């Protein structure tokens, strides 16, 4: 399989970067093809909201998004890695989602319900079904408060919304909590081991 990690953090030595790389390492050891895109290494502007991508199959903005999206289309497994920022994905990961709203889905074809055509735009159609997805996030809030207080829970919800819309199947989640934990090194190593195994078992 072809694995693509999309990493949305400036902290290249941080937890989610390390965990995403480890998943890829494990997958590579098992013969899969892997690549990693740190969104900060690319020029990625905000979505204009013009929907021209939906009609033309590519974005009008002159930045690196079309290149990134070609790789997304080619991937069998997407590894989405973002720290939890304000109970959500990082801003750049959100931009990555925004930029493909009209590419990953079509809102204009119209669907049928009980034999009747639904209004255009109702129930968008996924344009790249069949992918698998792995989520990675990290937050300082300890378990179970990361869930009870909607901290990394919301990050996962945002990732889930994207994969549900593109009809990708979520096969694994790595949620690192309490990242100010005193014994961080030991915990980090344990999670790196977990990440490696997830990749290896693909
Ligand atoms: C701008 C910003 C916002 C954050 N918001 C949250 C938050 O809402 N909840 C939380 O538990 N941690 C939050 N954190 C902490 C990070 O999620 C945490 O440090 C995480 O482990 C960083 O992952 P990294 O090592 O990959 O950078 C925030 C950190 C920053 C810099």
Image: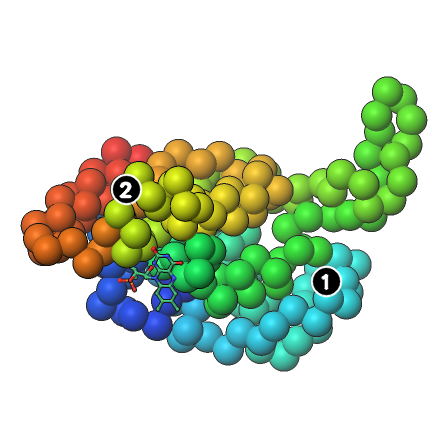
Callout 2: SS: loop
Spot occupied by residue 62 in the image (x, y as percentages of width and height): 63, 79
Q: Nearer the viewer, residue 180 or 27?
A: 180
Q: Answer with the quadrant where ligand 1 appears in the image.
A: bottom left
Spot occupied by residue 84 in the image (x, y as percentages of width and height): 39, 57
Q: Tell me, yes or no, whether the two marked residues, 1 and 2, touch with CB atoms within 8 Å.
A: no
**Position of 11 compared to 50: left or right?**
left
**Residue placed at 75% from the left, 57% from the top?**
54
**Residue placed at 24% from the left, 64% from the top?**
14
Query: Label 2, on which residue?
Result: 143
**Residue placed at 81% from the left, 41% from the top?**
122
Quadrant of the frame with the C terminus: top left
Q: Which residue lies furthest to the top in this view?
A: 114
Quadrant of the frame with the N terminus: top left
Circle 2 residues within 10 Å: few <14, some 14–19, many ≥20: some
Q: Nearer the viewer, residue 176 or 195?
A: 176
**From the viewer's perspective, is residue 98 above or below residue 29?**
below
Which numbered disc, 1 or 2, marks the residue that appears first in the sequence?
Answer: 1
Spot occupied by residue 176 in the image (x, y as percentages of width and height): 27, 48
Spot occupied by residue 155 in the image (x, y as percentages of width and height): 45, 50
In this rendering, which labeled residue sits more in front, label 1 or label 2?
A: 2
Q: Nearer the viewer, residue 140 or 55?
A: 140
**Position of 42 compared to 18: left or right?**
right
**Position of 132 compared to 32: left or right?**
right
Query: Label 1, on which residue?
Result: 53
Q: Quadrant of residue 41?
A: bottom left
Q: In which quarter of the image is residue 120?
A: top right
């Amino acid at each position: 399989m072809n694995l693509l990690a999309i990493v949305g953090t400036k902290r290249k030595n941080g937890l989610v970067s390390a965990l995403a790389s480890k998943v890829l390492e494990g997958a590579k050891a098992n013969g899969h093809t892997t690549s990693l895109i740190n969104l900060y290494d690319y020029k990625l502007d905000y979505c204009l909201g013009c929907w021209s991508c939906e009609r033309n199959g590519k974005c009008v903005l002159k930045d690196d998004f079309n290149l990134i999206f070609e790789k997304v289309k080619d991937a069998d497994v997407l590894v989405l890695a973002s720290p939890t920022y304000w109970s959500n994905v990082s801003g750049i990961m959100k931009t990555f989602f925004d930029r493909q709203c009209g590419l990953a889905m079509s809102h204009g074809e119209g669907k049928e319900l009980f034999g009747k055509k639904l209004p255009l735009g109702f129930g968008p159609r996924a344009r790249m079904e069949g992918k698998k997805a792995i989520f990675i996030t990290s937050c300082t809030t300890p378990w179970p408060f990361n869930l009870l207080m909607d901290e990394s829970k919301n990050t996962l919800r945002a990732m889930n919304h994207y994969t549900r819309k593109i009809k990708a199947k979520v096969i694994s989640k790595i949620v690192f909590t309490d990242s100010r934990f005193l014994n961080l090194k030991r915990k980090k190593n344990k999670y790196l081991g977990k990440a490696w195994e997830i990749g290896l078992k693909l």
